[in-house]
Structures are given as C-alpha cells and as structure tokens.
Amino acid sequence: MATVIGWDIGGAHLKAARCVNGRLDAAHELATPLWRGLGILEAAFAEMIRRLGPGDAHAVTMSGECCDAFASRADGVVGLVGIAARHLGAVRLYAGRQGFVDDVGPHALAIASANWRASAEAAAGRQPDGLFIDIGSTTADLVPLVGGAVAAVGDDDAGRLAAGELVYAGLTRSFVMALAPRAPFAGVWTPLMNEYFASAADIRRILGDLPEGADLQETADGRPKTLEASRARLARMIGREARDAPPEAWAHLAAWFAESQLRDICDAAFLRLSRGDVARDAPVIAAGVGAALAQEVARRLGRPCVEFTELVGGGAAVSVAAPAAAVALLLSREMC
C-alpha cells in the first residue's frame, strides 16, 4: 500500500492528512502559533508523526511563511521547508501552477501561500464547475472552478485580495475590531475600541454555533473559553462590562458582528462572480472549519452547495484540513 501524507504549514495551525492507496483515511490539526517561536512547529511535527505514522511520500504546502518569524516570504518558505525536511526526510513541495517540485530553488514565491490552489485543484478534479469556498480560522478563500480547472484571477495574496478571492474573515481568529468600525448597542451606534479584546471565536461561542474543537488558540485576554468570559471580552470592545446588559443584549451584538463578517464574504463572492465565468447553476463547494458559513453564502447566492468531503471523502476532519488532504490526493494521483 502507498501511503502519502499531506502537510499544510500555517502560521497558526499545522494540518496533516493521510492518504492510503488514493483514499483519505485520517486528518489532524494542531495549534502552532509561529509568532511565539519555531520550536512550537518542531514539536507539532513530532506529535503529528506520532499520530499518523510513517508515509511513503510527503507533500507539503503552506501559508506560514507570512508570519513575522521571517524577514521575507522567501526566507519563510526556506525555513519551513527546512523544518519539514528535518522531521520527514525527502518532501515534495506544492508550487501552485508549477505542480510539485523537489526543492525550493527558484520556486520559493510559487510555493508561498499556494495552499488554496491545491484545495481548489482537488475539488475541480471531481466538480468541474463551481465556486470553492474554504473558510478557515483566519481567512476565507473563494476560488472559481471552470471546466475542471482553477480559474483564479489572482496568483498571490495581493491579486487575490483585489479580485475578491481572498478575504481576511475566519471563524475563530478574526479580531472583532476588524469586523466593523461601529456596532449597534442599546439603540445607538457605538464606535469600537481598536484593541484585540475579543475574537470571532467569542462571537461564535456566544451564539452557540462554535464547532467542537474549532478554537485551538488562546483567548485575547488569556482567560477561559467560557460563555461568561466571551461576553466580558465582547463587552470590552464597546467600553462596557458584561454586567452592564442582560445576556440577550450580548447575543444580539454577537449576531450583528457575525452578520457583518458574513456580508464581507458574500460581497467578495458577488464581486468575483460578476466576471461571469462561473456557470449560474454551478454549486458552491464548502470546506474548512467554517464550512457552515460557506453553506450560508451559497444560500444567499442562490446556488446549490456541495461539501468538499462529499467529493474527496474522509469526513469533517478532512474538510478542516482541506489543503493538506488536497496535496496528499494530488501527489497520490501523480505517483499513480
């Protein structure tokens, strides 16, 4: 049996997925806040290998090269590949349009933050036309699929941001202060305090729709991940204490922030779809820890929705680790 393990090295999480004879059978995610030091990633690789066992081949993609542990993206790619190679041995590196390469060489910028394309390529192999939407902890990727191929306008973060193909809106790590400049509370619009007092995970915890195990990072204030503590953190965003209003008021405020974030993603989708290259009846393919939000985007767009795992198999854990699963599948296909 040929076992291929796919790896997605992010700035906040390490994700891995195992593919045996072309079938995904396991996926895991570990918190790796690289801004605290690269030793965290070293430990995460060791733990992930313990969980998944050895592989005959390893496929690597990433977005963690953007973290401030590195002076540049190219330096980041080299550094992350070095860590991966120390733990895995020989690795194949996903370089976007260039496919898999064996070393960084001149490919550093093609390897940098190409994980979105891997997921979209895997989806396009099974759903030729659609809008692939992967909503993770930090960002939302919106990738058009046309005729079985990735039809993205942008190749890098700058181009994708401008085209509506990348939105910095995630299920758990988004800063509440980045979701809107003001919010409705007690019948008036109130400005926000531009401090990292609360995150999107607090919003979801208050609303009761935070998936189990989705929030792997520490809270903004280091205090517990409880409903009461989330209300206190959200209250601080508007200069108040949780005791200043009943629980219903904080739920209403949380719902408004959730709607504001969803609107940003929908606006990006409408912008990208306005190019007219994606068939009107083509579905949204939903992936990521925020797949449920992608499903709601599909509803608002008036499109059917297909889950990524319906196309590739493997269950909810594979959806969360979509880029890792994708490079495992793509490399397995290449090996065959």
Image: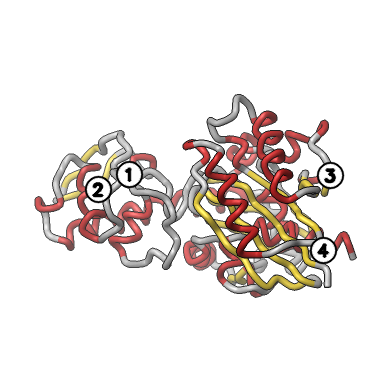
Mark number displayed over residue 220: 1
Asked if the residues shown at circle 3 and circle 2 are in contact, with their CB atoms under 8 angstroms apart, the answer is no
Residue 19: x and y, percent?
74, 67
Instruction: Identify the residue position indicated by label 3 in the image.
Output: 101
In the rendered image, which quarter contains the N terminus? bottom right
Q: Amino acid at mark 1?
A: Ala
Q: CA distance from mark 3 to mark 4?
A: 14 Å
Q: Amino acid at mark 2?
A: Arg
Which residue shows up at 55% across the image and 35% down it?
67
Residue at x 56% of width, y 48% of height: 43
Mark 1 secondary-structure assignment: loop
Q: Is any atom of residue 155 visible in this view?
A: no
Residue nearest the observer in this picture, 150 or 116? 116
The x and y percentages for residue 31 are: 50, 51
Residue 74, relative to residue 38: is it above or below?
A: above
Nearer mark to the viewer, of 1 and 2: 1
Tag 3 secondary structure: strand
Q: Disc 4 or 1, which lies upstream in sequence?
A: 1
Query: Residue 121 falls in which quadrant of the image?
Result: bottom right
Disc 2 element: helix
Residue at the spot of label 2: 233
Amino acid type at mark 3: Val
Q: Residue 96 shows which numbered tag?
A: none
Residue 159 in view: yes
Label 4 secondary element:
helix
Residue visible at 24% across and 59% down? Answer: 252
Label 3 – label 1 distance at C-alpha: 39 Å
Identify residue for label 4. Answer: 332
Separation of marks 2 and 4 at Cα, in angstroms: 45 Å
